[in-house]
Image (cartoon, helix red, strand yellow):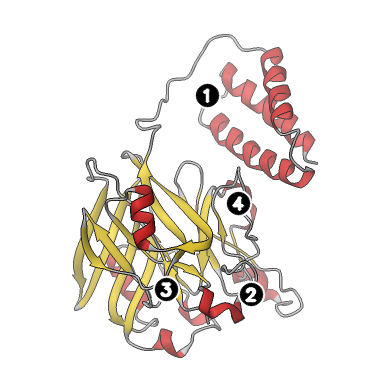
Amino acid sequence: MKKSLILLLLLFPFPVSANILIDTNVEWYKIRAIKVIKNTGFKIIVWVSEKGESLESMIKRYGWISWMNWAYFCPADYKSLCPTWNKTYADRISNSYDWSYSKDDTGPERVIFALDIYQNPFLFQKAHDYSRWRNDDFLIWKTLNFDRRWDIFNWIGNHPLLLQDWISKIDISGAIDAKMKSKSLKNFICSTEDGNSIFMGWIEWVTIYQVPGILKKFGCHNAVNLDWGGSTAMIHNGKYIRWPWRDIMDSWIIIPDKNYPAKTVVNEDPVTKRAAEKLKKQLDERFASVDSMTRKQKYFALSSRLWHMAEALPAESKKRKLLEWLKNEIDRNIQ
């Protein structure tokens, strides 16, 4: 069992009303978490490092002010379970356009907490161990939102799945170890039912079996376990609340959203097929230097984004027709 998980929530020094430090109790269980509200000036991304970096080094390098951390990884002294690249196997993609070196096959236990390009959260799972899971159960809970793979823009995956649509899924996991069963700090990431808020934090002195019920009362709709407390850390507005004891290799980070407030004005100037063809040519030139598989991945991600952009426009909008035409051209490239 891998030992540590570092989820890093970064807040830069300007108004933090969209990123709220919560210190509360659910029944008699203490919860500390950061609440991130969508479309309020911040966004969540994934940070990855192949070799890891100390907390002190990152503070000096990036000047981070407030954060909470714990992201799942394989530390250097625990390499027997993850010998390649000293990292978690198959659990993280930092950016669907740039791609990362980790696979998206989650295995039968791991579930991904994902964000699309608009910061909408959803669960994703794609297990490929067909020889072991060749039964109806595979189709029921070994895949989640399988058709949304190309909507993923940032993710980190872990196990077990805690809540799905308010329902506890802890009993379906076959990977609960003694440390999870013991009473200790348990970390989580979850989203509300409307998807407008994400919570990342921990519950103190509970077993893993208690976590789903507590999070449901806390307001979580979908939730994934992140760690069972080995190296949790939190810094908020310069105050050190907890400190990690391992180097960090991957993390969720909160950063300012440069596109906020979002521009929603639709350009109604005349657009033509020629304009779309010109844009497609520019894309082909831009991706010409990458290998065919990477190019296909980038086109998949772009196609999904164009579809969402087109759906938001009126059916007769000329801009929508342009986006749909461009999407169709891209789709022909990746058949």
Residue drawn 49% across and 75% down?
A: 160
Left or right: 94, with 24 as reference point: right
Mark before the other along the chain sequence, 3 or 4: 4
Question: Whole-percent x and y of residue 292?
Answer: 79, 43
Amino acid at dot 2: Pro
What residue is at 36 percent from the left and 62 percent from the top? 55
The label shown at residue 148 is 4
Mark 1 residue type:
Pro
Please report contact status of discs 3 and 1: CB closer than 8 Å, yes or no: no
SS class, disc 3: strand
Crowd band around label 3 with a 10 angstrom C-alpha radius: few (<14), some (14–19), many (20+):
many
Residue that label 1 marks: 314
- Helix, strand or loop for disc 2: loop
Q: Amino acid at mark 4?
A: Arg
Q: Position of residue 192 (x, y in %)?
A: 36, 56
Q: How far apart are the alpha carbons under marks 2 and 1?
A: 51 Å
Q: Which residue is mark 2?
A: 83
Circle 1: element type: loop
